[in-house]
Image (cartoon, helix red, strand yellow):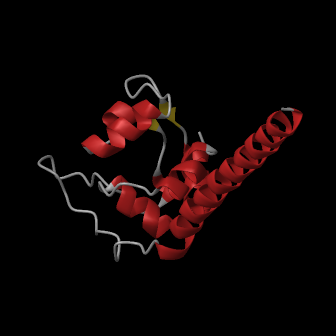
Amino acid sequence: MPNETNSYKVFMKRGVWFFMAAVIVVVLVFVGLQFLLYQPTGNPPSPEPNETGVESISTDPDAFAGMYLRDLPLSEPQRSYATAAGFDVETQYVTKEAMACAAEAIGAGRLATIRAGDTPTYVESVQLVKCL
């Protein structure tokens, strides 16, 4: 009988190690694919005047004075990502420094595309959260 108990323990230990290694490999592959396969969705849109004749999207972070997230034209996926990340869309304030950090983290062109309504990737979201 002692052999059966001992072999069961060895089997369980190896099974746990194998499962942990498999989870780590899956996570690494997922993160690696985010970096390797992501291609930006083209050129950022050019700012267009809205009904009041004022440009609603600026590609220049220096022209940004700061605003609340509720004042940005967030798409539903962007709004749900912000809420899932723990941000209150109604009260979160984005400063000029945060926009400069975001432009440096993902590039000014990609930032303009996201501000125009494109949804950031997981990797971009992680980079942008550091700026808030």
Residue in the foreground of this view, choosing between 81 and 7: 7
Which of the 4 quarters of the picture holds residue 102? Answer: bottom right
Please state which of residues 100 and 79 is positioned toward the viewer in this rendering. 79
Residue at the image point whose x is 48% and y is 39% from the top: 66
Q: Please provide percent x and percent y for residue 131.
A: 61, 45
Residue 81 position by quadrant: top left
Q: In this view, does 114 lie above or below 71?
A: below
Q: Relative to residue 24, is residue 95 depicted above or below? A: above
Give the percent coordinates (x, y) of residue 55.
Answer: 27, 55
Quadrant the C terminus occupies: top right
Q: How many marks?
A: 0
Q: Nearer the viewer, residue 75 or 10?
A: 10
Q: Can residue 43 be seen in this view?
A: yes
Considering every residue shown, the one lying at the far left of the view is 51
Residue at 83% over, 32% down:
1
Q: Based on the displayed image, in which of its 4 quarters is residue 44 positioned?
A: bottom left
Which residue appears at 19% of the width and 57% of the height?
49
In front of the other: 42 or 25: 25
Residue 121, image x and y in percent?
Answer: 45, 57
Residue plotted at (49% across, 54% down):
122
Q: Can residue 73 be seen from the camera position used here?
A: no
Question: Would you say 28 lies left or right of 63 here?
Answer: right
| Residue 15 location (% of width, % of height) | 70, 47
